[in-house]
Image (cartoon, rainbow, N blue to C red):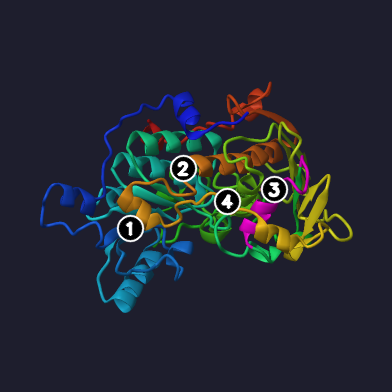
Amino acid sequence: MKQNRREFIKKAGLGIGLFTILPRPVLGKLNGDTRYTAPSDQLTRGIIGVGGIGMSDLHFASDERCRLVAVCDVDKYHLRRALDAGEERFGTRLQPYSDWRDLVHDANVDIVHIATPSHWHGIMAVEAAKAGKDIFCEKPMTRTIGEGEKVVKAVHDNGRIFRLDTWFRFTDTFYGLGTTVEPLKKLVMSGELGWPLTVRISESTGFAWKFYWTGRTDLTPQPIPDELDYDMWLGPAPYKPYHPHRIHQTFRGYWDYESGGLGDMGQHYIDPVQYILGKDDTYPVKVEVDAPRQDADAVGVWRRITYTYADGCKIILEGEGFETPGKVPYIEGPKGKVYKGFECTIPNVQDLVNSLPAPPPRHTDFLDCVRTRQHFALDEIIGHHSCTIVNIGSCALRLGRNLEFDPASCRFVGDDEANALINQPMRAPWAQYMSV
């Protein structure tokens, strides 16, 4: 079932004609307040989580369009490193925070960049939207389907601009596939491959799932380091005794915080497929898993996950120890196949693609979207759709069985245990921040 933006908003009970909270520079200009810079001048940004991606050269940056002004982390070492880097690179003292709520409500911050472990993404995005901030969120967008639904509502209700930070539907070469997405999109839109299509995401077609993001079942409690606020790091997640393997980079191996390599890389891989297939407004109706039995706490490996849409299109994720032998197509249809490097069974495919119309233009400049209040090309609704596909697979993998999914209700069919994973309990006091 197709679901456009208007239908999604209507189904979620979101109103229209809402008051939009404008960014500080835009609001100041409209009010004639000379204390604020013009919209053409710098926006400001704060980063929550500076232990990994938040410290990358791509994100830990300031320029004439957007100035980094604040950083937050629950690890004092991470925070100190970020402050030192700010002084060294920008010649300025960044505002430090140990509690993310203080950064979100800082009046000097226009854009909140969420670069924390995934179990925090939903709460922080909702609170940032309610605080009138625009949001730049790392993948996966949320850890559960229910959190994604609440982020969508909060962003809409508060008139915010949201960007999910997975970029392969745009201009970058799509990991190891050897091509950008646009020629694949044009070829699929032409109908030359036929329909339905099967997309296979595997090592053979240039992808490498991070199977080292698995958990351990032999953890013994360890003393909490002085520099770490472990209770705040856990936040809404169930309390588990501290062990260094639970936090920082290896947190992805535990269901409480993410879902291993699927959660870490799934939205990078699946989001462009949604775009290529023209399915940004729908979901698969079935997911099948082939995997060893999973531990209740630690995420394990998996061999294959297969998603099937109502029209017969499939996305097949091939994991550890399960590689289709021989030369494997990335996209396969009744009338043609496309392989890594844009090698295709259709003669003169490059000439064909060059003759085809380009896909409709999209707004891919996030800062410009913040200023003009236009939706970013990978906004909260599109991001929620591709993240939901990741989370459908996560639920099936965690339960160890195939599941049917209803795109209309966004719930599993006849499976109470699976539906219980859509909205999972949160430790006090964090559930209150998800009220929308």
Mark nearest the camera among 1 and 4 is 4
- Mark 1 sits on what residue? 46
Q: For numbered disc 4, what is the local secondary structure?
A: loop
- Mark 3 sits on what residue? 190
Amino acid residing under circle 3: Ser
Q: Residue furthest front?
A: 355
Q: For numbered disc 3, what is the local secondary structure?
A: helix
Gap between marks 4 and 2, in whole Å?
Answer: 21 Å
- Mark 2 sits on what residue? 380
The C terminus appears in which quarter of the rendering?
A: top left
Magenta span includes 397: no
Left or right placement of residue 358 versus residue 8 in this view: right
Instruction: Find the magenta span and give its range.
Output: 180-196
Question: Which comes sooner in the sequence, label 2 or label 1?
Answer: 1
Mark nearest the camera among 2 and 1 is 2
Gap between marks 1 and 3, in whole Å?
Answer: 43 Å
Question: Crowding near pointer 3: few (<14 within 10 Å), some, many (20+)?
Answer: some
Query: Where is residue 408 drawn, in percent x and y?
Result: 59, 25
Amino acid residing under circle 2: Glu
Is residue 216 at all visible to an observer of this figure? no
- Mark 4 sits on what residue? 359
Left or right placement of residue 122 versus residue 389 in this view: left
Question: Which comes sooner in the sequence, label 1 or label 3?
Answer: 1
Amino acid residing under circle 1: Gly
